[in-house]
Amino acid sequence: MRILMYTWEFPPLIAGGLGMACYGMVKALLKQNVEVDLIIPTREAVYFPMRTPEDADTLPVVFLDEKKQEEFDKKTFEDANERFHYIGITEAPETYKQVEEITESIKQAVEEEEDVEEQDEYNPGYEDVWENIAHHLMGSDDIFQKVQEFTLRAERFAKLLEFDAIHAHDWLCYPAGMIARKISGKPLVSHMHATEFDRAGGPGNPNVHNIEFTGMTYSDYVIAVSQYTAEMVISRYRIDTGKIRIVHNAYIVDDNIEKCEKRLFKGATILFLGRITLQKGPEFFLEVAKSVLEKHPDARFIMAGSGDMARKIIQRSAMLKLRNRFLFTGFLNRKEVDEILKMSDIYMLPSISEPFGIAPLEAMAYGVTAVISKQSGVSEVVENAYKIDFWDVPKMVKVINDLIEHPAKRRKLGIAGMNEVHQIQWDDAATKIKTVYQEAIDEFSKE
Amino acid sequence: MLNIVFYFQVHQPYRLRHLNILNARTAEDYFDNGLDQIVMQRVADRCYLPANQMMLKLLRRFAGKFKIAYSITGCAIEQMKLYAPEALKSFHDLMDTGYVEMIGETYYHSLSSLYDIDEFLEQVAQHKKMLKDEFGVTPTVFRNTELIYDDMLSNLIFEEEGYKVILTEGADRILRWRKPLHSYKNYTKDIFLLLKHYKLSDDIAFRFSDPEWDEYPLTTEKFVNWINKLTLSEQDDKNLFLNIFIDYETFGEHQWAESGIFKFMEKLPETVLVQPNLGFCFPSEVEKFTNYQPESITVPEPVSWADLDRDISAWVENEMQTNAIETLYELLHKIKQQNRTDLLRTARLLSTSDHFYYMSTKYFQDGDVHKYFSPYDSPEQAYIYYINALADLEEKLHENPHETDIEEEKPA
């Protein structure tokens, strides 16, 4: 079985959790003999044919242009980074055509194949699904231009490559997946890692909503990363329940973690780790800190990360006169994240809406006791963590006070959580995803 | 007769590193010695050395007819010793002429007068001792950090031995209909007040090289002409004081040498002294020259020389500044209570007003000035690093110090 996969992130190209999820997933799929042709936003028109689990780390590359392939084959690279740089992985696409030009090109590309398939089967309520998707790619932001570029290129891959099914991650890749489906006639599985409602913490960008809706509607199957996300896909996007499958994310535990005894602070250390943005509920963390510090002034609250709400939270923490007990680290690199997790006692994820949320698993892997929002996918897969509604500040305060007052209980829960996280494997998730592929392929061959 | 009173402020803070809670483990690590060294050496090259050389020539040439006063913070003296000893020597050379007066202030350039009176008096005493040790003088004139002044300050300084005069800002709201050219007194205590003439001071300090300014370029002749006009309003033969109070770094650092600031100053004494009704005096000579009953003024709310507001809002206005400074003084209090002399110096270095200045979020004109002086990208960053330092320092307070770790407080 071979899958044509479109994703916006894959290591080393990582902006958020999507990249790591795709990596874990692809590697586990390769172990189960699913071959993947991976396409990510690169400057050069290349794809990554992966056949063995090691390929997920080495990223073998093929250029669409034969001349460029010859040039590439002749070159020697000092290290992986230099090779990635050559392909243009770390950089955004350099040249953008005019918006209209690209939109027109997408339409043309589709129209050429027009007679292959019937028009209306997958787009209830829309006269022309392509007009719709092209219309909604007309955003003014840079990201929309990048998506257009990516989508246009998707067509070439779909024509050239041999595959059994298409897998597209998140809205950024939905238009690409749709074009590939249209051109190849192969089934499309779209993967919902986060909806615009989650990201925006409110209504969000209507163009993105429309791309999400159209993309999922046009897909043969939709994989949601949690029950929580599946419910959102059903209630907010009215997607046919019958084609939704839930596959929880997993987490690759680093075997080298050692819980060190070195502490940052004598008092209990409570950590927020992630982007400081509305979706992650930083204000609730601050509210909890205020109440807990009234009872336990020796506790220390650390907000690690950066984001558009950082300034507001910094100023508010000062306004609440939290003294030197509410601290900020700014953006942390991998090594610093490792250090701060080792030195923390309690991890809090007060997200307003978290489709999955990998960070608590990471914290638990370090033996840190996790207190997580019920409005998250991750709360569906772990037992040894407190799950509380993000808005229920009094309850969070009660739980954290209790954990501070009972360190033995805290440690016991931390160890149980650590053991639990080791059981959450990508292999299980890959098995489920493979089944979804198989279902889609079987249905298609029947037709 | 109008006496021009020149007082120059010399100060350099110890700047905090971009301090992360993960890497702050020794108090020595808090401060960015490398940056302090670069700044001190740059300012010495551009300002202290050439300006002192110029002043030395002028003082010798006019042999007592031209006089100036300095206030130099303990932090600045320490950093000169460390990074620019030749600059310190040049100040000694100035002192040796006998035509220079040293003014007292807080050793650490702190806002302690507003938050912790005991600490304030200790820092004032420490600065007094430094002046004695370093220059062999005892000050009779006091200036508080950034010319911050309110009635309470007179009460405090009056109780300290030797002080007779306080310098502060001639803010409109305390002068109202009065001129800054007279000497004044505190309304209850026998302390003279000299008030900065902010118009003429700021013409030199801020506007001198501004091509947008109507009066640009400012020549010595033009400036002295303005001064001469000031005396016309006075008819009762009262002696007047024109108080030009500016940062010494105005020469060569804030106003570059290319702007002509040195030439402007070099010509000033001779241009002034040919006028029969103009002269120079030390701030301490105010009592001698006051030939009238000074009016007393009251200042219930603090004034300062900073920004357009001329109040304390440059340092304690927004919530970050308030939380930071309150946390510092609480911590300082605990450190003293527990007699942790090993931590006291660090806490005092954190009391320097510049740390709070960097956290200012004022916009428009003033914000530019704040930004120019800040080693950080934003007020929030300055706040984060500062709070991290206080968190770490408090943690050290909780640790039981090993006996070998305790070091008596010693200046660098």
Image (cartoon, coloured by chain):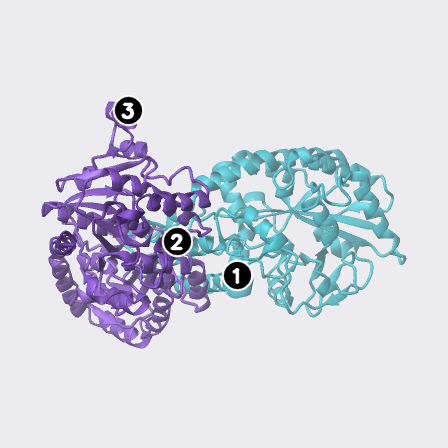
Chain colours: A purple, B cyan
Q: CA distance from mark 1 to mark 3?
A: 69 Å
Q: Amino acid at mark 2?
A: Glu
Quick one: quadrant of the C terminus of chain A? Answer: bottom left
Quadrant of the image occupied by residue A376: bottom left
The chain to which mark 1 is attached is: B
Nearer-the-camera pick, A402 or A3: A3
The number of numbered discs placed on residues in the rendered structure image is 3
* SS for dot 3: helix
Discs 1, 3: same chain: no
**Where residue B87 sits: x, y (%)?**
56, 36
Q: Secondary structure at mark 1?
A: helix
**3 or 2: tag closer to the N-terminus:** 3
Q: Amino acid at mark 1?
A: Ser
Q: Does residue A116 sit above or below A300 in this rendering?
A: above
> Looking at the image, is B362 positioned above or below residue A12?
below
Which chain letter matches label 3? A
* Left or right: A366 as drawn, with respect to A44: left
Name the mark on residue A71.
3
| Chain of the residue that carries numbered disc 2 in the rendered image | A
Q: Is residue A68 left or right of residue A283?
A: left
Distance between mark 3 and mark 2 Cα atoms:
39 Å
Residue at numbered disc 1: B112
Which mark is drawn over residue A131? 2
| Relative side of A300 to B386, left or right | left
- Residue B201 screen position, x and y as percent: 71, 49
Residue B145 in view, yes or no: yes
Helix, strand or loop status at disc 2: helix
